[in-house]
Image (cartoon, grey):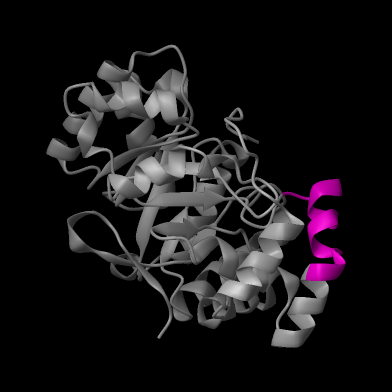
């Protein structure tokens, strides 16, 4: 059975969802992106993550089209800019996201990263949005361990449902304190860029001889190995972006890959975690 994660209020979510960063930027890709998201829903990747930032709201429009007629099948996540994360600005931003997504509620609304607006104000307006029925839950993104300690001391801060952070085999800094603490709180972590971004780092992962040898041995792709590694951690959800149906199918198949302890150790030896506290990676 494909791996699932127990989310807040006893809801089960797939351990791999669908990210939408860079979607909605090119009209020529629109149909492929909509079809990819729909195929992902068909394959059980029912968590879809987006943000008002992505393509200035156009990614949300792609998602809105993809989930048309299927809203009840989807766990929908969007994110608010830090400068919109207080008082009326947050309410307006949320309402605008809902319009673009063509829905009347979000399953989860995240503070995209920390800005100048006090956490107390953000928590308060998130609670207000929950009370209004515009969002079911709220959480944060790109907050490090010290930020989470601060949030936990804010009234209502414990209602935070998740922290979405960058995490992949070549970026393991959260394992030092943030991930263990989150697991202790039984608060799931969402891993964005679980395959690393395009560029030298991603190339170094995809072309690494140890990973390629292991992938060949298991009859999988390196990308599938990387996703399987991310989600083998307790209460971690990966949200890779896939712009084509073929890519979505590859991601979904990673849900079925089982890594042995020996295979995990092999991968982690090739890309060791830092032995000290490091700044939170962000892109």
Numbered disc total: 0
Q: Quadrant of residue 129?
A: top left
Which residue appears at 24% of the width and 64% of the height?
Answer: 11
Q: Position of residue 251 (x, y in %)?
A: 60, 72
105 or 143, nearer to the observer: 143
Q: Determine if the magenta segment contains residue 204.
A: yes
Residue at the spot 73% in from the left edge and 49% down from the top edge: 197
Q: Is residue 260 above or below residue 278?
A: below
Where does the magenta region start and end? 197-210
Magenta stretch, main secondary structure, is: helix
Q: Residue at x 34, y 60 (%)?
A: 75
Occupied quadrant, residue 207: bottom right
Image quarter in which the N terminus is found: bottom left
Could you tell whether 96 is left or right of 161 in the image? Answer: right
Mark yes or no: residue 199 visible. Answer: no
Image coordinates of residue 46 in percent, x first then y, are 41, 68
Q: Residue at x 46, y 71 (%)?
A: 45
Q: Is residue 208 above or below residue 93?
A: below
**Viewer-nearest residue: 202 or 235:** 235
Who is closer to the viewer here, 137 or 231?
Answer: 231
Most extreme residue toward the left, as rendered?
A: 131
* 56 magenta-colored: no
Q: Percent position (x, y) of residue 266?
A: 70, 67
Is residue 43 in view from this perspective?
yes
Quadrant of image for the C terminus:
top right
Residue 247 in the figure: left or right of residue 38? right
Q: Position of residue 121 (x, y in %)?
A: 27, 17
């Amino acid at each position: 059975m494909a791996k699932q994660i127990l989310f807040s209020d006893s809801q089960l979510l797939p351990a791999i969802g669908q990210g939408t960063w860079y979607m909605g930027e090119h009209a020529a890709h629109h149909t492929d992106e909509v079809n990819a998201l729909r195929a992902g829903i068909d394959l059980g990747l029912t968590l879809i993550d987006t943000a008002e930032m992505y393509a200035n709201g156009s990614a949300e429009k792609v998602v809105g089209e993809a989930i048309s007629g299927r809203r009840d099948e989807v766990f929908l996540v969007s994110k608010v800019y830090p400068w919109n994360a207080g008082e009326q600005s947050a309410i307006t931003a949320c309402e605008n996201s809902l319009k673009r997504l063509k829905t009347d509620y979000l399953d989860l609304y995240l503070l995209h990263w920390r800005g100048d607006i006090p956490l107390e104000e953000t928590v308060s307006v998130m609670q207000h949005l929950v009370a209004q029925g515009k969002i079911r839950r709220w959480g944060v993104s790109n907050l490090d361990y010290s930020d989470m300690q601060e949030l936990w001391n804010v009234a209502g801060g414990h209602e935070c449902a998740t922290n979405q952070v960058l995490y992949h085999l070549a970026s393991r800094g959260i394992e030092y304190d943030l991930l263990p603490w989150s697991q202790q709180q039984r608060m799931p972590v969402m891993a964005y860029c679980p395959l690393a971004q395009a560029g030298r780092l991603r190339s170094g992962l995809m072309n690494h001889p140890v990973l390629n040898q292991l992938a060949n041995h298991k009859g999988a792709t390196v990308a599938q190995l990387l996703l399987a590694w991310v989600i083998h951690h307790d209460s971690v959800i990966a949200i890779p972006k896939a712009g084509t149906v073929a890519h979505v199918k590859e991601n979904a198949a990673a849900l079925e890959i089982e890594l042995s302890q020996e295979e995990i150790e092999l991968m982690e030896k090739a890309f060791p975690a830092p032995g000290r506290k490091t700044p939170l990676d962000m892109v």
